[in-house]
Image (spheres, grey):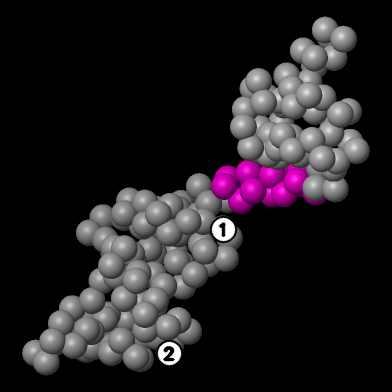
């Protein structure tokens, strides 16, 4: 049992072995390492070697990316762990809570997007037939820029209600 733990803790996996097992390109491993998401050690021949726990970190990175979590946010999450350790099951339960809240925000955004995607989004182009109704004279530009109905609907509604009250 002790020997198995020692083998698991030794940085003995090659970059190719990790890339294959984690289903990522070697260049992705180099990128993750450069961004501080994973780490490797060098052997006597100056070749990268990884501990087995890097496979869990990469799985978490990939899961986060699939959920739309940025690499910066993933790094910030992993950096909360002491000694840059790989998350345990208990760690993951705590860490994933913040990601669940982000997912809820993204879901709400996507639902809002679905409601407006076929009409005026408050971008200021005023090129659609519905723009004069939803965004007369680009009134939402008084509150925010960009696709305001999608990005900041409260500000867009505030501008629109002020316009409606005036007219």
Q: Which residue is mark 2?
A: 20
Q: In the rendered structure, does residue 121 fall within the stretch colored magenta?
A: no
Residue 156 shown left or right of residue 90 in the figure: right
Badges 2 and 1: C-beta atoms under 8 Å apart? no
Chain part drawn in magenta? 101-115
Does residue 100 lie above or below 87 as drawn?
above
Q: Main SS of the magenta segment?
A: helix
Kindly tell me whether residue 41 is visible in this rendering. yes
* Secondary structure at numbered mark 2: helix
Task: Please state, as top left, top right, bottom left or bottom right, where the N terminus lies in the image.
Answer: bottom left
Secondary structure, mark 1, is loop
> Vertically, is 147 above or below 61?
above
Q: Which mark is residue 68?
A: 1
Question: Can you give x and y, in whole percent of width and height, for residue 56 in the image?
Answer: 41, 73
Is 2 placed above or below 70 here? below
**Picture residue at 29% right of the left edge, 70% below the top:** 33
Mark 1 Cα within 10 Å, few/some/many (few <14, many 20+)? some
Q: Quadrant of residue 145?
A: top right
Q: Is residue 115 visible?
A: no
Residue drawn where x is 11% and y is 92% of the image: 45
Count of all numbered marks drawn on residues in the image = 2
Mark 2 Cα shell of 10 Å, populated few (<14), some (14-19), many (≥20): few
Residue 110 in magenta? yes
Q: Position of residue 48 (x, y in %)?
A: 22, 84
Which mark identifies residue 1?
A: none
Q: Residue furthest left?
A: 44
């Amino acid at each position: 049992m002790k020997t198995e733990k020692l083998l698991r803790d030794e940085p003995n996996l090659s970059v190719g072995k990790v890339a294959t097992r984690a289903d990522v390109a070697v260049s992705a491993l180099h990128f993750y390492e450069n961004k501080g998401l994973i780490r490797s050690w060098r052997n006597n021949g100056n070749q990268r070697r990884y501990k087995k726990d890097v496979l869990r970190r990469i799985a978490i990175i990939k899961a986060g990316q699939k959920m739309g979590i940025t690499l910066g946010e993933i790094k910030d999450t992993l950096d909360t762990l002491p000694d840059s350790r790989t998350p345990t099951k208990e760690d993951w339960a705590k860490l994933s809570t913040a990601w669940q809240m982000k997912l809820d925000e993204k879901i709400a955004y996507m639902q809002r997007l679905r409601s407006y995607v076929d009409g005026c989004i408050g971008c200021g182009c005023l090129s659609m037939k519905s723009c004069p109704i939803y965004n007369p004279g680009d009134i939402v530009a008084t509150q925010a820029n960009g696709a305001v109905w999608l990005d900041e609907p409260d500000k867009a509604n505030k501008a629109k209600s002020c316009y409606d009250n005036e007219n």
